[in-house]
């Protein structure tokens, strides 16, 4: 995997369902495809300075899009649902709720 943990985490997921999990110390991120649970755990702990209890990975398949007579496919993505130790929060993402 990548040596830099900042390269592994692409962006937080800002859906309504993902934001509702922040109250339970559960954060959702898009991560680099091909990442594993251990790498995601270490990256989140290093970047945000928190203790990770559990990591679940979800593969999000890309959608097929049509524009006129041309068809294409959006990229496949990997989502990580990261559960932190009870009472811990990521301060950078606190203002989203």
Image (tube, rainbow, N blue to C red):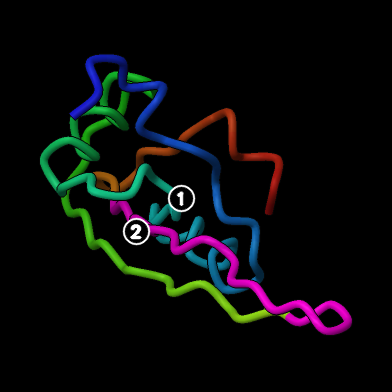
* Residue indicated by mark 2: 81
Residue situated in front as seen by the camera: 55 or 21? 55
Taking the view exactly as shown, the residue that stands out farthest to the front is: 69
**Secondary structure at numbered mark 1:** strand
Circle nearer the viewer, 1 or 2? 1
| Image-based side of 30 in relation to 1, left or right | right
* Residue indicated by mark 1: 30
Q: Which residues are magenta?
A: 66-83
Residue 1 coordinates in the image, percent (x, y): 18, 29
Please identify the quadrant where the C terminus is shown: bottom right
Residue situated in front as seen by the camera: 69 or 40? 69
Q: In the rendered structure, which disc, 1 or 2, sits on the residue that comes first in sequence?
A: 1
State whether residue 39 is above or below residue 33: above
**Secondary structure at numbered mark 2:** strand
Instruction: Tell me the quarter of the picture where residue 49 sits.
Output: top left
Query: Disc 1 and disc 2: Cα gap in Å?
Result: 9 Å
Tell me what residue is drawn at x 70 percent, y 40 percent: 95
Residue 72 coordinates in the image, percent (x, y): 64, 72
């Amino acid at each position: 995997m990548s040596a830099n943990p900042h390269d592994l985490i692409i962006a937080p997921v800002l859906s309504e369902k993902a934001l509702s999990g922040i109250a339970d110390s559960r954060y959702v991120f898009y991560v680099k495809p091909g990442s594993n649970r251990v790498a995601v755990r270490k990256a989140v702990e290093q970047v945000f300075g928190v203790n990770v209890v559990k990591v679940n990975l979800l593969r999000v398949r890309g959608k097929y899009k049509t524009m006129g007579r041309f068809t294409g496919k959006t990229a496949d993505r990997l989502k990580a649902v990261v559960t932190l130790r009870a009472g811990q929060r990521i301060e950078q993402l606190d203002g989203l709720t």
